[in-house]
Image: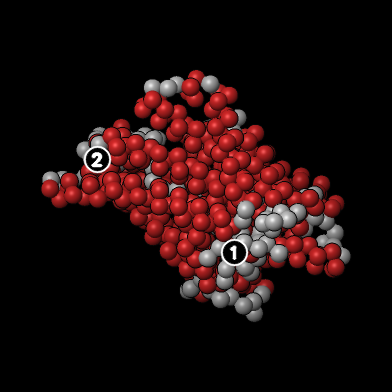
């Protein structure tokens, strides 16, 4: 690429005005990864109370922490917009940089369509339970229109910039965490008055401990996934060398407690652990505190889905933006809003794609998600190792501790867990899902020679 053109396009990225300070960044990170304990209900019925609690505690140590350490080193050494695209491009090659960005963007098509659909599902359940209204349940068109309202409301919010997204994430965090905290306090009081062993059985009687551990591990991994995505907006974080690692250090225990305490509180309720299934937390809250608490938790589920979409759109919309900046995608995707100085065209294009994908069903595509994320993570760790070898002089404000042994361990644990999760999922879904995964991976190898015509680097 012509040097003056490259400098002009780099100036576009540097012009991104809105900056995230520490606490808004923590809450954006919280919603990038978690959004509360919703979605953990199946863990209890699949693995049993005891193993569920153990998995919630140990998974961040062998899954979240290694990824956070990797992100900490790379993002502080290269605090640039585009995150893992920049790392892999510099550490491996532009070819592999394109692949990691492409895989991540494809993965977002499925991920980002889930949250507006969850919002509509939660709203439908609340309308049925409290208003005896079945409109959303009976009308696919109305259901889709609700998902569109969610998508385009938060696309508009994202266009206002990272600071606005961070401020709303703080509000959403309070709205989501407060009913869980009230439920936990009431359950703790009830347990003190009437102590009981709520962590037994350790595993379902009809399943071995190893089998129960494997099934539950995938559920917990899914709920702890996404620590690397926040690096896509490193160029929009105030003092990223300090604030990004600090935000990770705050967010990991916050997410762990946001999972552990509500699950423990729900087990204290006395409702059969075998009945735990997706969307069961409002029922648990009702058993603990009454209908008002169940309604509060149900409404918080709406906020959680919206907060997840809002925070993830901020990060994922930067992927096509930086690809366009390197001329793999049309230059129009680099346009900044004249008032807010945000990549509004990229945000609008992503929102339009997600609007289409909400019309699809995704059960069989979850495996594709796991395969793509495994590919992304492998490339990120490969870039971490390659940069240690090829650029030992690179200034690293934060380094993964333990030298090469520490580096090997933080790469080994997440990749081993991903391999186990993929194997378990293939056992459940069947080999036919491999075809979709192979198509998704092959699309990057086909897209690169087609799109690189615009790129003269």
| Residue 30 located left or right of residue 455 | left
Residue assigned mark 2: 289
The residue lying furthest to the right in this view is 2
Q: Where residue 444 sits in the image (x, y, percent)?
A: 71, 47
Label ID, residue 19 = 1
Tell me the quadrant of the picture where the N terminus can be found: bottom right
Residue 415 visible at all: no
Tell me the quadrant of the picture where the C terminus can be found: bottom right
CA distance for labels 2 and 1: 40 Å
| Residue 291 located left or right of residue 158 | left
Quadrant assignment, res 255 = bottom left
The residue lying furthest to the left in this view is 193
Give neighbour class at mark 2: few <14, some 14-19, many 20+ (Cα, 10 Å): some
Q: Where residue 188 sits in the image (x, y, percent)?
A: 21, 50
| Secondary element at tag 1 | loop
| Residue 152 located left or right of residue 399 | right
Label ID, residue 196 = none
Q: Where residue 450 sits in the image (x, y, percent)?
A: 82, 46
- Residue in the foreground of this view, choosing between 373 and 292: 292
Residue 355 visible at all: yes
The residue lying furthest to the bottom in this view is 393
């Amino acid at each position: 690429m012509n040097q003056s053109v490259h400098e002009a396009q780099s100036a576009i990225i540097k012009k991104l005005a809105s900056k995230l300070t520490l606490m808004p960044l923590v809450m954006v990170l919280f919603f990038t990864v978690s959004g509360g304990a919703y979605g953990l209900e199946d863990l209890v019925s699949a693995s049993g109370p005891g193993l569920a609690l153990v998995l919630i505690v140990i998974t961040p140590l062998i899954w979240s922490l290694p990824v956070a350490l990797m992100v900490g080193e790379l993002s502080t050494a290269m605090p640039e917009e585009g995150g893992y695209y920049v790392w892999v491009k510099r550490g491996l090659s532009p070819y592999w940089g394109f692949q990691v960005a492409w895989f991540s963007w494809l993965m977002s098509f499925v991920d980002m369509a889930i949250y507006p659909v969850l919002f509509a599902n939660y709203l439908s359940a609340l309308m049925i339970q409290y208003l005896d209204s079945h409109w959303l349940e009976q009308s696919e068109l109305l259901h889709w229109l609700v998902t569109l309202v969610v998508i385009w409301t938060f696309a508009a919010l994202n266009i206002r910039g990272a600071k606005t997204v961070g401020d709303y994430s703080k509000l959403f965090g309070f709205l989501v965490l407060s009913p869980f905290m009230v439920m936990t306090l009431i359950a703790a009081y009830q347990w003190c008055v009437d102590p009981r062993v709520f962590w037994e059985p350790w595993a379902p009687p009809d399943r071995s401990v190893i089998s129960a551990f494997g099934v539950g591990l995938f559920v917990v991994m899914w709920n702890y996934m996404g620590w690397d995505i926040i690096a896509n907006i490193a160029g929009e974080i105030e003092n990223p060398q300090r604030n990004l690692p600090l935000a990770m250090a705050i967010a990991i225990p916050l997410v762990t407690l946001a999972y552990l305490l509500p699950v423990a509180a729900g087990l204290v309720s006395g409702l059969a652990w075998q009945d735990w299934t997706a969307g069961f937390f409002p029922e648990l809250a009702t058993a603990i505190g009454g209908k008002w608490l169940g309604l509060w938790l149900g409404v918080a589920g709406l906020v959680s889905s919206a907060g997840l979409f809002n925070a993830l759109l901020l990060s994922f919309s930067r992927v096509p933006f930086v690809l366009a900046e390197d001329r793999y995608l049309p230059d129009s995707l680099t346009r900044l809003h004249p008032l807010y100085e945000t990549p509004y065209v990229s945000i609008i294009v992503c929102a339009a794609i997600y609007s289409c994908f909400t019309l699809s069903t995704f059960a069989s595509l979850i495996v594709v998600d796991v395969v793509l994320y495994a590919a992304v993570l492998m490339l990120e760790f490969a870039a971490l190792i390659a940069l240690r070898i090829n650029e030992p002089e690179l200034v690293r404000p934060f380094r993964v501790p333990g030298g090469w042994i520490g580096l090997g361990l933080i790469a080994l644990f997440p990749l081993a867990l991903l391999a186990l999760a993929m194997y378990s999922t293939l056992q459940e879904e069947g080999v036919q899902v491999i075809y979709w995964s192979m198509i998704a991976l092959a699309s990057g190898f086909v897209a690169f020679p087609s799109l690189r015509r615009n790129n003269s680097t």
